[in-house]
Image (cartoon, rainbow, N blue to C red):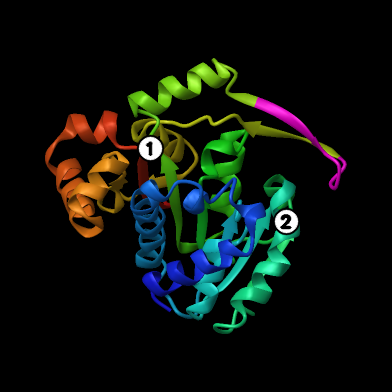
Amino acid sequence: MNIDQFFSLFLKELETQPTLWHYYKFHTDPGSLEFRKAYFCQRLQYIADNITKKDSITWDIGCGYGTTALFLALNGYKVHGTTLEFYFKEIPARIAYWSQFGDVSGFTFGYEDLFDESEGKGEFDYIIVQDTLHHLEPLDQALQIIRHHLKPDGQMVSIEENGSNIIQSLKLYKQRGNNRIIEFYDERLKKTILLGNENIRSLAKWRDALKKNGLGLNEKSVNYVRAYPPFLFNKYGYQEAIRKEQALWKSNSIAKEYFFFGVNFTASKS
């Protein structure tokens, strides 16, 4: 199943699942649909481009509602998702929906805390951290666990917000100030969990954190997404707006560093 097909079926699913609308806002503002679709599909494409071994096993840390894992399972991959909080209870209904369109038995999931996953070593070809890496605390320990679970030639695939983005940084500072790490009590696990409070970082800071913990950022893998506002997607059209954005970050270092919202990258064992 390709990404366009998946996205079309995803929109139909959301029509019957309004409980997901607070997270996936495709139905709340029709004027921003192309803008939001571009962000969603480009990031999913990045994952598809970097998970290519058909006999691979992937760990999706912070899989949320399982969207990425379901897409990969429909394309023949084995993925185990780890999730917490309110996401967990919605996943069985989603599996039932997507089972209409293909075999999703390769997707397994559990209500799990990353920091409890110390057993095993080198069992995953890929580890996905999508909108998750900036939530993991203590970060050094989290990166060491990820490294521990990667095969020698394994790869971490990260989808992140760009911590250098001026607008997003100001918005988050207004929301949480410098309170970058919080804790909450998980009733299901009966334990207190540390959580990065939208603790986004620049690519340079991620590079340093990875190096400190025995992982190397793959420089050629870096990809920036989302700079244009919704009205430019409506003006240029979906494909042309994406083409212009991709050309912009590759040619303008200031725009790339300070005005693109998302940054994607992979990392491997040093």
Residue 194 numbered tag: none
Amino acid type at mark 1:
Arg
The crowd level at tag 2 (other Cα within 10 Å; few <14, some 14-19, many 20+) is: some
**Pair 2/1: label in front:** 2
Q: Is residue 23 left or right of residue 85?
A: left
* Pick the front one: 153 or 161: 161
Does 187 appear in magenta? Answer: yes
Position in image of residue 88 (x %, y %): 73, 56
Is residue 19 positioned above or below 262 on the image? below
Position in image of residue 32 (x %, y %): 38, 47
Q: Is residue 247 visible?
A: yes
Locate residue 142: give its quadrant. top right
Q: Range of the magenta residues?
A: 182-190
Is residue 20 positioned above or below 170 on the image? below
Is residue 160 positioned above or below 170 on the image? below
Position in image of residue 126 (x %, y %): 49, 63
Locate residue 254: give its quadrant. top left
Q: Is residue 57 visible?
A: no
For label 1, the residue is: 207
Amino acid type at mark 2:
Phe
Q: Secondary structure at mark 2?
A: helix
Q: Is residue 230 left or right of residue 59?
A: left
* Pick the front one: 181 or 225: 225
For label 2, the residue is: 88
